[in-house]
Image: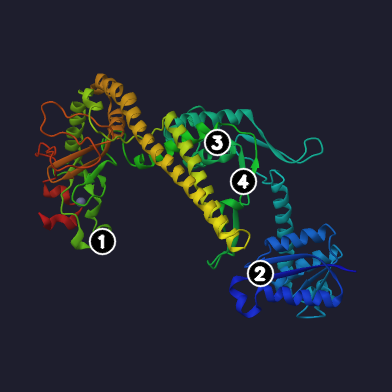
């Protein structure tokens, strides 16, 4: 008796004209029974395109053929195996080599043809296509197999590693830490986690004459950014992250796109940095994206990225222009001055440019005054925005995560109960009794979760205020007048959420609550929410806004507004 397997495929778009999987299976079962074969395996690809060979059912079928489990494959027609002729031949050729014959129910006789002979009658291009597909496919399956077995299959090793090829002595191919480079990797992550800019790290590496990964004398910005994101340094290399798909552009055949993350095959490799350091460096990256150093001379725009237009609520750009007497003036100008960005001429911002030097000085003076009295900080109901997590907070977060999983499990249990009841495995009273029990348990979990979340918020507020603000303000107060421009800029970014400028009014929203300066009628806002009772700081008026017409020439479309 011939050991036979069947293969069926339905692609989503073709279900109407090729029938469902069910009808294919019924037909194949009938034929196999009629032929007197013994059915030992069913391989099905439901909803897979025939344009590609990497289908789970087909892969399994080919593995079974290779393992000698089957002698014949039953299939509706060659196009079920693959849509492209070259791929059909590839599969048939391979099955033939494993001594497996193929029977097609739709086109009897084709299986007896020699696929190679048929192939040779085709045009030269098809042969080339076939060879290429064959090699690529064999290569792909081999690599997938080895990657799943934990072997490093990519030829290139990341900076800091050396690839040890497969050999009898060392086993499968793997990565080894290359200490001279690994030391550089550690140094880069440590610097980055300490808040040093990528550009500065590049500069220091170059100054120390450390060659780049490609052996060049200088390190590039993008090279360093890629390195900082590379998970190999925490012990994970990935294979199967991308796939090639047909490209619509006329000059290209294919392009690479990302696969879903659950299709990636992680492969272990020795780590170079700790998870904590890796994440710390990543956090700095997100914090800093707002403060792009591009085009900004350090310290020149103290409030770069912080100033918002009070009328439009959008951010401002930094702008430098030459005045009538040849001196340079710096401005923050509302992004909605650009009619396209504002969404039409009518919506354009009516505000004038903001003099940067005047605003910088004004805001800085206010911050300095506010810092002199940190004692009342702990008294009020002050929400705080701080990004640095604290250890207690991490514990609570883990506990919250655990509760979330338990709640999910309770939900799943409820669903299973209903399934059991519908399947006739349990009776209604039993289902109700158990469902009540699950519901009660879920409610209790939810309650725990809510109180824990509240606790977490309180704790975060207390801790942050107590631990940080007081001595922070005291320390700053001692040195505030000795700061250089870059340090001033850093301080303001640390303290200020944003600065809204409307007319002559300046509203400073702080990230950390500070009390108002003693003799001022214009307190900076303690919380993120503006309140109408409190008067806004009013700037010294003269000089905050641009006045001279010549200074507006750079934005000529605004001239007639004056
Ligand atoms: Zn505006």
Q: Position of residue 78 (x, y in %)?
A: 74, 74
Pointers 1 and 2 in contact (CB under 8 A)?
Answer: no
Inter-mark Cα distance, 2 to 3 = 44 Å
The residue wearing badge 1 is 343
Mark 3 crowdedness (10 Å alpha carbons): few <14, some 14-19, many ≥20: some
Residue 125: in sight, yes or no?
no
Mark 4: few/some/many CA within 10 Å (<14, 14-19, 20+): some
Q: Position of residue 287 (x, y in %)?
A: 39, 38
Check if mark 4's residue and mark 1's residue have beta carbons within 8 Å. Answer: no
Q: Earlier in the sequence, mark 3 or mark 1?
A: 3
Mark 1 neighbour class, 10 Å CA radius: few under 14, some 14 to 19, many 20 or more: few
Q: Which residue is mark 3?
A: 212
Identify the mark at residue 50; answer none if there is no mark: 2
Instruction: From the image, state whether disc 3 or disc 1 is nearer to you.
Output: 1
- Whether ligand 1 has any atom under 8 Å from the Cβ at mark 1 is answered as no
Point out residue 77 in the picture as x, y percentages from the top left corner: 74, 76
Q: SS for tag 4?
A: strand
Gap in angstroms between the C-alphas marked 3 and 4? 23 Å
3D distance between C-alphas at marks 4 and 1 = 44 Å
Left or right: 390 as drawn, with respect to 86? left
Instruction: Please give the name of the residue rendered at 53% of the width and 52% of the height, measured from the top-left corner.
Output: 433
Q: Which mark is residue 238?
A: 4
């Amino acid at each position: 008796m011939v050991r036979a397997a069947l293969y069926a495929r339905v692609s989503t778009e073709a279900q109407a004209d090729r029938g469902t999987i069910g009808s294919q299976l019924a037909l194949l079962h009938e034929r196999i029974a009629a032929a007197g074969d013994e059915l030992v395996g069913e391989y099905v690809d439901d909803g897979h395109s025939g344009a590609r060979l990497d289908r789970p059912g087909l892969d399994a079928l080919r593995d079974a053929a290779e393992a000698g489990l089957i002698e014949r494959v039953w299939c509706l027609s060659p196009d079920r195996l693959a849509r492209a002729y070259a791929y059909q031949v590839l599969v048939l050729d391979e099955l033939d080599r494993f001594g497996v014959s193929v029977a097609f129910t739709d086109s009897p006789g084709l299986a007896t043809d020699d696929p190679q002979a048929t192939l040779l009658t085709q045009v030269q291009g098809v042969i080339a296509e076939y060879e290429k597909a064959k090699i690529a496919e064999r290569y792909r399956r081999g690599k997938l197999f080895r990657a799943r077995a934990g072997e490093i299959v990519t030829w290139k090793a990341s900076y800091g590693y050396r690839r040890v090829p497969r050999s009898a002595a060392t086993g499968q191919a793997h990565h080894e830490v290359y200490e001279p480079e690994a030391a550089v990797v550690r140094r880069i992550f440590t610097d980055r986690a300490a808040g040093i800019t990528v550009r500065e790290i590049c500069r220091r590496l170059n100054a120390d004459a450390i060659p780049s990964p490609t052996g060049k004398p200088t390190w590039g910005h993008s090279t360093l950014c890629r390195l900082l994101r590379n998970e190999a340094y925490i012990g994970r290399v990935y294979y199967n992250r991308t796939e090639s798909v047909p490209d619509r552009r006329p000059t290209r055949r294919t392009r690479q796109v990302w696969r879903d993350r659950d299709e990636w095959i992680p492969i272990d490799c020795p780590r170079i940095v700790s998870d904590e350091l890796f994440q710390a460096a990543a956090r700095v990256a997100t914090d800093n994206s707002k403060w792009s150093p591009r085009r900004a001379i350090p310290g020149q725009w103290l409030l770069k990225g912080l100033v918002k237009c009070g009328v439009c609520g959008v951010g401002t750009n930094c702008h430098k222009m030459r005045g009538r007497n040849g001196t340079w003036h710096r401005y923050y100008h509302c992004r909605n001055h650009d009619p396209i960005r504002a969404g039409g001429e009518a919506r354009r911002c009516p505000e004038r440019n903001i003099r940067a030097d005047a605003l910088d000085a004004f805001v800085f003076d206010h911050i300095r005054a506010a810092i002199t009295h940190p004692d009342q900080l702990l008294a009020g109901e002050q929400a705080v925005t701080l990004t640095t997590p604290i250890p207690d907070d991490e514990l609570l977060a883990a506990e919250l995560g655990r509760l979330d999983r338990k709640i999910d499990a309770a939900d799943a249990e409820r669903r299973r109960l209903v399934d059991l009841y519908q399947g006739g495995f349990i009776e209604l009273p039993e289902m109700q009794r158990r469902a009540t029990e699950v519901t009660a348990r879920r409610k209790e979990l939810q309650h725990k979760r809510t109180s824990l979340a509240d606790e977490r918020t309180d704790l975060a507020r207390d801790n942050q205020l107590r631990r940080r603000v007081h001595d922070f303000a005291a320390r700053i107060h001692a040195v505030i007048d000795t700061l250089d421009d870059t340090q001033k800029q850093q301080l303001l970014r640390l303290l200020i959420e944003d600065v809204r400028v409307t007319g002559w009014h300046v509203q400073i929203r702080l990230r950390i609550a500070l009390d108002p300066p003693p003799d001022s009628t214009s307190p900076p806002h303690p919380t993120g929410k503006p309140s109408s009772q409190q008067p806004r700081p009013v700037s010294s008026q003269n000089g905050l806004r641009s006045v001279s017409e010549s200074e507006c020439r750079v934005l000529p479309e605004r001239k007639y507004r004056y």
